[in-house]
Image (cartoon, helix red, strand yellow):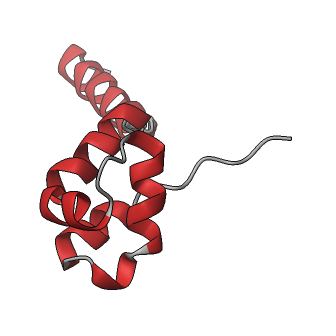
Amino acid sequence: MKRPHLLLIAALAAQYAAAQTPAPAQSAPSREAQLEAVLQACVGPAFQLCPGQTGEALLACLKSNAGKLTSGCKDAVMKVPLPKLTK
């Protein structure tokens, strides 16, 4: 085989190997980032429906009032799971 053919084969093999390597998974946003996104999307409803609530308590309050939320706020709230209770 001539040298250009070997280079072509090597390049194709490298390209095939790169295509077979899965992309790294993106990490999920932190809990704080999720709660911040909820607060930004729900400023009005948070103050009206859940005065004085913050953090997890605010999230629980907003979830319990889901029917009264704007669509953007409701979408943000529903993306964040409530924490699991431990005994």
Does residue 76 lie above or below 1 as drawn? below
Residue 42 in sight? yes
Between 41 and 6, the one lying in front of the other is 41
Question: Is 84 on the left or on the right of 73, as rendered?
Answer: right
Give the farthest residue toward the right: 87
Place residue 26 in its image quadrant.
top left
Label count reads 0
The percent position of residue 27, horizontal first and vertical second, equals 41, 34
Between 51 and 67, the one lying in front of the other is 51
Question: Is 12 on the left or on the right of 58, as rendered?
Answer: left
Does residue 50 lie above or below 54 as drawn? below
Residue 27 in sight? no
Residue drawn at point x = 19 percent, y = 77 percent: 70
Where the N terminus falls, by quadrant?
top left
Question: Is 75 on the left or on the right of 78, as rendered?
Answer: left
The percent position of residue 47, horizontal first and vertical second, equals 20, 57
Residue drawn at point x = 86 percent, y = 41 percent: 87
Give the farthest residue toward the top: 3
Give the farthest residue toward the front: 52
Does residue 12 lie above or below 42 as drawn? above
The percent position of residue 15, horizontal first and vertical second, equals 30, 33
Residue drawn at point x = 47 percent, y = 45 percent: 56
The percent position of residue 2, horizontal first and vertical second, equals 25, 18
Does residue 53 lie above or below 12 as drawn? below
Question: Is 24 on the left or on the right of 85, as rendered?
Answer: left
Residue drawn at point x = 15 percent, y = 56 percent: 43
Place residue 65 in its image quadrant.
bottom left
